[in-house]
């Protein structure tokens, strides 16, 4: 039997509807066993990076770091779906451009359509571009082509490009430099894997990836850094707001030491990983900014949770002093993206 339960809640975080696929007695047993079976080790994310106490850097408000929300649509969408998303964004009530800068990144084939139909205060970005001028590079899109289309932003160094396409930090640094030189603005992604996190090498990894960029550019005005903890994307691990803040603060301190205090204070560092759990169960993990997650518990009863991040679940993260915005994945395809955009008002309150 399939029964649809009432939406649950966990603190101030809105939870999705639950679909219980089991006879009623089994459901009752499962719900009674849920908390007893949960263990502390299963609920906690990996140990944090080494604590540090960097010198104070002016706050985002004091330095004029406008909140930034990027929506990465990845390899998703049809003509009809893209039109629906654009209509939702056009009709939504979002914070003013004085409060938040919003950029959405559809697949290449939809860039002209989205740019033409989307409200002007929301900009568009490509999800990648080639490292040099166009030519005999089948399947690639050059920075010059994006500029010709009037596309102002590009995402470079995303964890999926690094892991699936084998893009090295050096290669990403070259792409960032070339894109900037052609007049594009860049969302440059950095982040560590689960193994690197658990080995305590988070900052070494993030610093190495960032150093590959700093060695090739001088002007950071048109760069937004996106911290993507790869270990918190579909792994069963999640980051707390405090953990995200810790890495952001350490990365900002690294920029202060290795680039300049001015760049550290003015560069926006946004977050692109999972948020903390909605459900306390050792076999369940929940939603991310980067993708919708479907989780199945194959115990006596089976529980399937389907949903997405809401504005309420990211407000605490938005309130962290060194978190200047989000790079959103699956949730940017849904109406909830409006709520995530409006989390920017936490900074201006």
Image (spheres, rainbow, N blue to C red):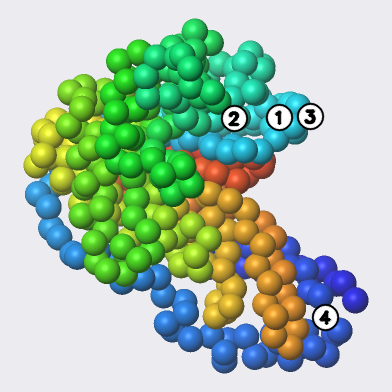
Q: Residue at x 85, y 85 (%)?
A: 24
Q: Position of residue 343 (x, y in %)?
A: 48, 43
- Mark identifier at residue 64: none
Q: Label 4 to label 2, Cα distance in Å? A: 39 Å
Q: Is residue 313 left or right of residue 330?
A: left
Tell me which numbered mark, 4 or 3, is placed earlier along the sequence.
4
Mark 3 lies on residue: 80
User: Which structural element holds mark 2?
Assistant: loop
Q: Is residue 141 left or right of residue 195?
A: right
Look at mark 1 in the image and give the residue it sits on.
82
Q: Earlier in the sequence, mark 2 or mark 3?
A: 3
The N terminus lies in quadrant: bottom right
Element class at badge 3: helix
Q: Are marks 2 and 1 in contact (CB under 8 Å)?
A: yes
Mark 2 packing: few (<14 Cα in 10 Å), some, or many (20+)?
Answer: many
Q: Earlier in the sequence, mark 4 or mark 2?
A: 4
Please give left or right for residue 200 compared with residue 257 in the image. right
Q: Is residue 152 above or below residue 186?
A: above
Q: Which residue is mark 4?
A: 22
What residue is pinned by disc 2? 106
- What residue is at 31 percent from the left and 69 percent from the top? 198
Residue at mark 1 to residue at mark 3: CA–CA distance: 6 Å
Q: Nearer the viewer, residue 65 or 226?
A: 226
């Amino acid at each position: 039997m399939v029964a649809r339960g009432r939406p649950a809640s966990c603190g101030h975080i809105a939870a999705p509807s639950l679909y219980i696929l089991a006879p009623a007695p089994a459901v009752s047993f499962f719900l009674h066993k849920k908390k007893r079976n949960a263990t502390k080790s299963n609920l906690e994310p990996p140990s944090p990076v080494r604590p540090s106490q960097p010198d104070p850097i002016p706050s985002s408000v004091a330095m004029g770091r406008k909140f930034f929300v990027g929506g990465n649509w990845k390899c998703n969408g049809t003509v009809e779906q893209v039109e629906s998303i654009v209509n939702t964004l056009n009709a939504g009530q979002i914070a003013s451009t004085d409060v938040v800068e919003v950029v959405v990144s559809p697949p290449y084939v939809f860039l002209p359509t989205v740019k033409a139909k989307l409200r002007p205060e929301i900009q568009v970005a490509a999800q990648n571009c080639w490292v040099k001028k166009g030519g005999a590079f089948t399947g690639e899109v050059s920075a010059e082509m994006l500029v010709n289309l009037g596309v102002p932003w590009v995402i470079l160094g995303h964890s999926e490009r690094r892991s699936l396409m084998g893009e090295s930090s050096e290669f990403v640094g070259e792409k960032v430099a070339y894109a900037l030189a052609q007049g594009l603005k860049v969302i440059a992604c950095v982040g560590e894997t689960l193994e690197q996190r658990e080995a305590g090498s988070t900052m070494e990894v993030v610093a190495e990836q960032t150093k590959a960029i700093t060695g090739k550019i001088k002007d950071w005005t048109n760069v937004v850094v996106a911290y993507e903890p790869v270990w918190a994307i579909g792994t069963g691990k999640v980051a707390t707001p405090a953990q995200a803040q810790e890495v952001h603060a350490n990365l900002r301190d690294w920029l202060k030491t290795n680039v300049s205090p001015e760049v550290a204070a003015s560069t926006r560092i946004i977050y692109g990983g999972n948020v903390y759990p909605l459900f306390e169960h050792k076999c369940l993990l929940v939603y991310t900014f980067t993708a919708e997650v479907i989780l199945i518990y194959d115990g006596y009863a089976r529980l399937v949770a389907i949903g997405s991040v809401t504005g309420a679940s990211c407000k605490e993260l938005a309130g962290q002093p060194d978190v200047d915005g989000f790079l959103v994945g699956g949730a940017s395809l849904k109406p909830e993206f409006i709520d995530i955009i409006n989390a920017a008002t936490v900074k201006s309150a």
